[in-house]
Amino acid sequence: CLGVVSKAQGLAGLRIGWVASKDAELLEKMASTKLYTSICSAGPSEMLAAITMRSGQPLIEANCQIIKENVKHFEKFVREVPHLFSWHAPQAGSIALVKLLTDEPAKAFCHRTVTEAGVGLLPSEYFEFGDKYLRIGLGRRNFKECLDVL
């Protein structure tokens, strides 16, 4: 079982998580790798994660509401530009995979959106899923404003 505080709690960038397993050998390998790459997590990140975990359900509910609103915004956006995108709203979580319906490769499209509109999207080439998909995050409070500039 792998868990992080960055998704459900809406704390992108906070790199604190946990792992649980009955496989002692796997846990040892993971701990060894972790210690090889970094001795410890950043103190402020650990403190923010602890505060977040104590906040619990209200924070998760607030973030779920933001995601639900952003799904509605994106559905409307896709209806307005059906020649550009195809998608299915995520059943859970704040990340969606959107199919790009143009001839432009996803990496080029994403480069253009960030340079021309200041909106960052992740092209599918970065996670070895061809060149026709974009990964978008639906958890930002300014999501609609980002759509408005696209």
Image (cartoon, rainbow, N blue to C red):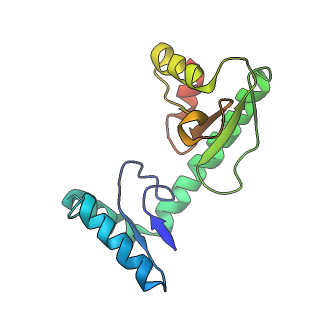
Q: Position of residue 143 (x, y in %)?
A: 54, 34
Residue 101, quarter of the rendered image: top right
Q: Residue at x 48, y 84 (%)?
A: 23
Q: Residue at x 74, y 31 (%)?
A: 76
* Front in this rendered view, residue 143 or 65: 143
Q: Position of residue 38 (x, y in %)?
A: 24, 59
- Tell me: 52 left or right of 140: left
Q: Is residue 128 visible?
A: yes
Residue 35, quarter of the rendered image: bottom left
Q: Quadrant of the C terminus?
A: top right
* Front in this rendered view, residue 100 or 31: 31
Label total for image: 0
Q: Does 77 sit above or below residue 45?
A: above
- Tell me: 12 left or right of 126: left
Q: Position of residue 31 (x, y in %)?
A: 32, 72
Q: Is residue 47 visible?
A: no
Q: Does 144 sit above or below residue 20?
A: above
Q: Position of residue 125 (x, y in %)?
A: 58, 34
Q: Does 50 sit above or below residue 84?
A: below
- Tell me: 131 left or right of 26: right
Q: Residue at x 49, y 55 (%)?
A: 7
* Front in this rendered view, residue 97 or 146: 97
